[in-house]
Image: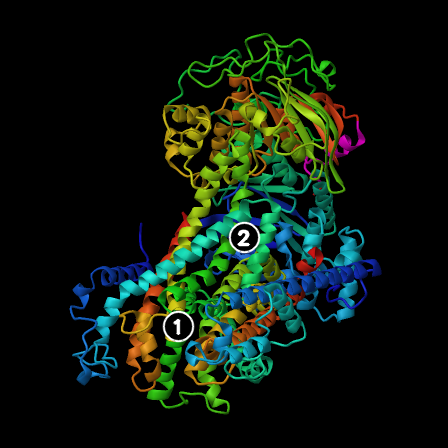
């Protein structure tokens, strides 16, 4: 399989992030929590590639060590969102008319809470924090995925090869298990890959607003939250964690799209 | 709807049938909107109920306020918190119907007037951003259809920008570039046009990415289609093909996205208004969430939901205007 | 006189691959030249190149490419734009998509006028209306305000033609102007084109359908693989083709070819064919022997059924050659089988052939439909259709679009429930039975469709699809049985590892046939199985179906709109119109002496390959 340049780059980025998540000491041997008050607010230099934060901690080390936690949040939120969406999407696509009707109306209502609003509502009720913000992001993304899954299910269910399967004498259970689900699952993978990037972005936005992770955790969102007040003067505190967020989201998006495209071509 | 020919080519029976369909559509739509609004209100009401702690305490300043029992009772009575839940629910719906969104816990002011104060600036911001984003998107989409590797690369770039760049990071980067380094623009919002530039750009760029990508695909599709070939075979040139045929086809999916774009802009406003210290719905929402000022949060959510329904209805109408096939189907 | 259009050594390449090469021809004023070719022959690309519309990625070279006194190859874009529409008109393939779905027909037609003339808006409107009337559009003022999706296929095509001739071009290029149209509609469009030609417009008519081309063209070019393989007057090319490809193309057309004769050259025997086919029948004549009899008949009645040899020739042996009068023509099944036992359905050793299902010994009737009715809303799709399909026979169902034939197919396949009437398979209730009772007997009824590819699960390889069919869904692992099955339909066993979307149309249909015969059915419902295939591929598939019918004793319910095909494949035929059977009977009887008015009109409208040239 020949890889295109963009795919190579994104895979390299993801590999780097994977190493950072699983074995951060390989890339940044220092201690992410080590305080050095005399060294605080240093701008990027050879000693501290990304600068230091308000307690003198090295930002590069913290960013690398925070990869694991941040990626986990993204994965968890995506899992929650997709899981819920799968349930609703399958119910709506397979179930009787009234179930489809009800689910579609429910989705419509959920769409009336655009973007972050549902997440904010959730946080108002259950309070800020890493866990609540992760769940909130997951819930917010669920309706979008559900709609996609539902239409995919319907598309597969009404396709000619399903009818051919009926003619061959296959039972409904067989058709669902051996034809519908496998064909729906394919799109799921793409959705998941694209979704991880999105979830990371949203979760980090919530953290930036102070509603997600908090310091001293070496997690990108927390670092953003801490750096909020110092934007104009000490921009590196927010810029570099943000950069990693952009890289992760970009890499997963490029990967997801290329999987999708290859799926169409092959 | 009889095409460009000014001669009345469509007979009267066909016309009134079309009008009848429009009316039916409008009624169905209105019903749908009301239903969704009711459902949103119900969801938010239950969100209210789920909040841990005693609302009366929250009103009086939080759990540590050590308010007296009489004060608590008075607060409960004032906010109607001592009634059984179904009664509270109906009262709530009733108040909403009259436009009464309650009173803010923190600001001691009418939620509706709090919202109205900040609505204007946010609408301005959102509207400008949408406009700028559409223009950028259209320009990029048209330019990218020229073909060639650069253009194809542009397509992917648009997509990545749209999906991977959080508003706060973009804002910071823009401030760094234009304010800190170049000094052209102010880092926070100042009265006057200049203060709007960075906030609008921050919101517009990711949105332009999405819209641009969608329009680009639709444009490419249209330009490759048999009816464009037929148009060229009639002697139509590139400009004619674009303005008469391709643009309309490209607009259809973009119009469909406006509803979603609205939601994205509102979410983005929360971040952008905070960073640039602009007064607006987003910033008020954030402080309400941070201070657990529930009535304000709910009020804003409801107003946004209402606005969203309005926007989607408008885009549906626009869709029907641009794509005549939808009118026939109703 | 100097030619209106002169093409010398035209070549078109896309990137590295040459799609058209060495094409040379001329068109005189008022003449109709036909270009015939199958898909991939380069005919459409050639047509577009004539207008300078081959595409931005194309390289077009020619020694000469001249229209009148303008050299198209050297023309500026502006000059080309002036030529297009005003001097050269273009009717492209597929009228539905040749009109912008968002604009009204009137506007599309008006565009030509606006681009080239100084007419005012009002004058343009009037001209549009008169053009529509000219091309035979009913209610022109109403239609002008409608969009393409509101018009039927034939009307759309007329609209497209109107926009192409709006300015009275001297040359009209028509690319597949009648494909996918019903025969009667097709005839109308061809009449229109012929009229335009007789009024002085030169015509380049491009089609895969020899009959269509031969009706209008005085000269014919046969293209294949981007080159012209033969050229000459229509009469010459059709009666005395020089090039083997041309001969093959003519032979492959099923119209007027007797039942049971091969249309195509037999394929090389695939590797794993287990046992030789036991010929109960004499060796079949192959294509090159046949042209001794004149192909086509210049409009005379075709030769009577008594002409083919008396011995059953390559079908299930039911064509006893007794002649049209004795053909079974009512809906009632004969109580005793009319064929000698043992010929039909004689199984080959080792190949799936013997029906597994215990049947009443002499059960001759495989499918019996009585009084089928199916309504969709207030539209009556099927209205009282009854028929009987016997073992080893083929019942053709022919009709135009909207005749209800596809609905009948779905009812027989039990994909849909009739509102009234019933279908019985092998004497047992079928449409009335609940699905759980029916499911075990579903293997008795198979199906193949027009679009074979979309009937395959896109995630499966050919081997998996066939293994699934052979094992009743239990296994998807291909084995020796799959290889044998592939051999039976003339495919190499290596095909099993590939995905259907990488196969050609003909191969895909063979896989579909293999899947259909795997569970050893008694009857296969064929819904337009060859309509989207090239003529030569179509011939091979029809031959295959014929062979399998003999080997396996299959019955076919063959649904099609193509009169030539139905005549070739069917023993009996039903003619349907608007949900009703308007005529039924033995194929030859119906085709030689149609009783119903509609049948006569239908037969008259079908273009046949005419050896006599049209008036120049």
Q: In this view, does C357 lie above or below A248?
A: above
Where is residue C356 shown, x and y percent of the image? 50, 16
Q: Give the range drawn in magenta.
A: C596-614
Tell me: C367 left or right of C579: left
Q: Position of residue B65 (x, y in %)?
A: 43, 80
Q: Considering depth in this image, is B85 or C105 the residue closer to the camera?
A: B85
Residue under circle 1?
A: A211
The residue depicted at 62 percent of the width and 55 percent of the height is C98
Residue B318 pos. (x, y %): 64, 68
- Say what secondary structure mark 1 lies in: loop
Under circle 2, the secondary element is: strand
Left of B291 or right of it: where is C202? right
Q: Is residue C173 something that shows in the picture?
A: no
Q: Nearer the viewer, residue C242 or B302?
A: B302
Kindly indicate whether the residue at mark 1 contacts the one at mark 2 (C-beta within 8 angstroms).
no
- At label 2, counting other C-alpha atoms closer than 10 Å, the crowd grade (few under 14, some 14-19, many 20 or more) is many
- Check the residue under mark 1 and report the chain it is in: A
- Residue C428 locus on image (x, y percent): 63, 19
> Is any atom of residue C409 visible in this view?
yes
Nearest the viewer among B310 and A164 is B310
Tell me the tag on residue C7: 2
Residue C597 part of the magenta segment? yes
Q: Residue at x 49, y 92 (%)?
A: B191
* Marks 2, 1: nearer the viewer: 1
Marks 2 and 1 share the same chain: no
Quadrant, the C terminus of chain C: top right
What is the chain letter for disc 2? C
The front one of C124 and A223 is A223
Whether residue A111 sits left or right of residue A2 in the image: it is: right
Q: Per the image, is B274 magenta?
A: no
User: In the displayed structure, would residue C463 be above or below residue C155?
Assistant: above
């Amino acid at each position: 399989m020949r890889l295109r340049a963009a795919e190579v780059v994104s895979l390299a980025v993801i590999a780097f992030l994977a190493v950072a998540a699983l074995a951060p000491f390989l890339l940044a041997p220092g201690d992410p929590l080590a305080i050095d008050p005399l060294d605080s607010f240093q701008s990027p230099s050879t000693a501290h590639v990304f600068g230091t934060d308000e307690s003198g901690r090295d930002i590069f080390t913290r960013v690398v060590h925070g990869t694991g936690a941040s990626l986990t949040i993204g994965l968890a939120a995506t899992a929650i969102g997709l899981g819920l969406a799968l349930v609703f999407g399958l119910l709506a696509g397979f179930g009787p008319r009234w179930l489809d009707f009800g689910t579609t109306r429910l989705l419509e209502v959920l769409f009336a809470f655009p973007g972050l609003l549902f997440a904010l509502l959730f946080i108002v009720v259950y309070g800020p924090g890493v866990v609540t913000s992760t769940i909130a992001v997951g819930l917010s993304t669920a309706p979008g995925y559900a709609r996609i899954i539902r239409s995919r299910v319907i598309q597969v269910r009404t396709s000619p090869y399903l009818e051919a399967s009926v003619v061959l004498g296959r039972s409904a259970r067989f058709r669902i298990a051996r034809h519908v689900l496998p064909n729906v699952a394919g799109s799921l993978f793409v959705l998941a890959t694209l979704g991880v990037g999105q979830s990371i972005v949203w979760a980090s936005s919530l953290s930036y607003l102070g509603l997600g992770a908090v310091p001293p955790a070496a997690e990108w969102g927390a670092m953003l939250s801490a750096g909020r007040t110092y934007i104009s003067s000490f921009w590196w505190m927010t810029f570099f964690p943000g950069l990693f967020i952009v890289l992760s989201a970009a890499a997963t998006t490029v990967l997801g799209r290329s999987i999708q495209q290859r799926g169409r071509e092959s | 709807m009889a095409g460009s020919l000014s001669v009345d080519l469509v007979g009267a029976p066909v016309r009134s049938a079309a009008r009848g369909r429009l009316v039916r559509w409008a009624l169905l739509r209105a019903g749908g909107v009301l239903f969704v609004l009711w459902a949103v209100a119900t969801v938010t009401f239950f969100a209210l109920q789920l909040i841990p702690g005693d609302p009366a305490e929250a009103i009086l300043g939080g759990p540590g306020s050590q308010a007296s029992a009489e004060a608590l009772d008075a607060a409960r009575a004032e906010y109607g918190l001592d009634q059984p839940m179904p009664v509270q629910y109906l009262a709530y719906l009733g108040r909403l119907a009259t436009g009464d969104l309650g009173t803010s816990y923190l600001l001691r002011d009418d939620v509706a007037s709090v919202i109205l104060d900040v609505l204007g600036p946010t609408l301005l911001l959102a509207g400008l951003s949408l406009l700028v984003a559409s223009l950028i998107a259209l320009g990029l989409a048209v330019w990218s259809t020229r073909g060639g590797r650069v253009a194809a690369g542009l397509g992917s770039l648009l997509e990545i920008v749209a999906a991977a760049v959080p508003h706060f990071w973009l804002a910071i980067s823009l401030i760094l570039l234009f304010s800190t380094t170049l000094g052209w623009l102010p880092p926070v919002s100042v009265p006057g046009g200049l203060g709007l530039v960075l906030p609008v750009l921050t919101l517009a760029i990711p949105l332009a990415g999405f819209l641009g990508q969608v329009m680009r695909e639709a444009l490419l599709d249209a330009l490759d289609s048999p009816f464009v070939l037929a148009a060229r075979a009639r002697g139509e040139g590139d400009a004619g093909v674009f303005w008469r045929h391709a643009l309309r086809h490209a607009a259809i999916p973009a119009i469909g996205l406006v509803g979603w774009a609205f939601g994205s802009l509102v979410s983005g406003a929360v971040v952008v208004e905070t960073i640039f210290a602009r007064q607006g719905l987003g910033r008020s929402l954030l402080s309400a969430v941070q201070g657990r000022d529930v009535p304000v949060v709910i009020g804003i959510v409801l107003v946004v939901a209402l606005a969203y329904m309005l926007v989607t209805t408008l885009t549906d109408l626009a869709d029907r205007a641009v794509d005549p096939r939808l009118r026939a189907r109703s | 006189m100097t030619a209106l259009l002169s093409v010398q050594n035209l070549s078109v390449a896309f990137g590295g691959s040459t799609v058209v090469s060495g094409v040379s021809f001329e068109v005189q004023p008022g003449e109709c030249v036909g270009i015939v070719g199958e898909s991939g022959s380069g005919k459409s690309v050639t047509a577009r190149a004539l207008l300078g519309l081959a595409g931005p990625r194309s390289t077009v070279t020619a020694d000469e490419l001249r229209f009148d006194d303008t050299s198209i190859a050297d023309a500026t874009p502006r000059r080309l734009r002036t030529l297009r529409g005003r001097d050269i008109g273009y009717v492209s393939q597929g009228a539905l998509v040749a009109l912008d779905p968002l604009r009204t027909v009137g506007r599309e037609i008006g565009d030509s006028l606006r681009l080239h003339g100084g007419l005012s808006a009002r004058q343009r409107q009037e001209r549009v209306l008169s053009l529509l009337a000219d091309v035979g559009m009913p209610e022109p003022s109403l239609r002008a305000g409608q969009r393409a999706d509101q018009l039927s296929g034939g009307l759309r095509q007329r609209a497209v033609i109107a926009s192409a001739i709006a300015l009275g071009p001297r040359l009209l290029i028509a690319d597949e102007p009648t494909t996918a149209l019903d025969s009667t509609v097709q005839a109308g469009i061809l009449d229109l084109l012929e009229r335009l030609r007789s009024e002085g417009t030169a015509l380049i008519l491009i089609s895969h359908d020899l009959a269509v081309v031969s009706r209008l063209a005085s000269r014919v070019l046969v293209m294949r693989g981007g080159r012209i393989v033969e050229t000459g007057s229509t009469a010459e090319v059709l009666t005395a083709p020089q090039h083997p490809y041309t001969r093959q193309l003519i032979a492959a057309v099923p119209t007027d070819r007797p039942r049971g004769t091969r249309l195509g050259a037999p394929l090389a025997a695939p590797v794993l064919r287990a046992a030789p086919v036991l010929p109960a029948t004499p060796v079949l004549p192959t294509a090159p022997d046949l042209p001794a009899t004149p192909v086509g008949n210049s409009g005379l009645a075709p030769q009577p059924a008594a002409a083919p040899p008396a011995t059953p020739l390559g079908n299930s042996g039911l064509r006893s050659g007794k002649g049209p009068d004795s053909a079974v023509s009512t809906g009632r099944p004969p109580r005793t089988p009319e064929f000698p036992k043992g010929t039909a359905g004689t199984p080959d050793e080792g190949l799936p052939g013997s029906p597994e299902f215990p049947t009443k010994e002499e059960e001759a009737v495989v499918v019996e439909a009585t009084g089928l009715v199916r309504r969709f809303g207030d539209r009556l799709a099927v209205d009282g259709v009854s028929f009987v399909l016997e073992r080893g026979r083929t019942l053709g169902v022919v009709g135009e679009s909207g005749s209800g034939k596809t609905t009948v197919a779905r009812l027989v396949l039990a994909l849909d429930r009739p509102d009234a009437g019933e279908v019985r398979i092998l004497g047992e209730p079928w449409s009335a039975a609940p699905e759980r009772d029916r499911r075990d007997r579903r293997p008795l009824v198979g199906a193949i469709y027009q679009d074979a590819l979309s009937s395959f699960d896109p995630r499966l390889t050919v081997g998996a699809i066939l293994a699934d069919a052979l094992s009743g869904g239990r296994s998807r692992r291909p084995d020796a049985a799959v290889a044998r099955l592939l051999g039976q339909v003339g495919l190499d066993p290596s095909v099993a590892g590939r995905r259907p979307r990488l196969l050609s149309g003909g191969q895909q249909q063979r896989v579909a046939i293999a899947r259909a015969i795997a569970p050893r059915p008694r009857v296969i419902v064929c819904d337009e199985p060859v309509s989207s295939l090239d003529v030569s591929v179509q011939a091979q598939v029809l031959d295959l179906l014929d062979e399998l019918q003999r080997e396996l004793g299959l019955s076919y319910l063959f649904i099609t709109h193509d009169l030539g095909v139905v005549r070739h494949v069917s023993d009996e035929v039903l003619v349907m119109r608007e949900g009703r059977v308007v005529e039924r009977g033995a194929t030859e009887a119906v085709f030689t002496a149609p009783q119903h008015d509609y049948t006569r009109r239908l037969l008259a409208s079908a273009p046949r390959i005419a050896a006599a040239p049209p008036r120049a």
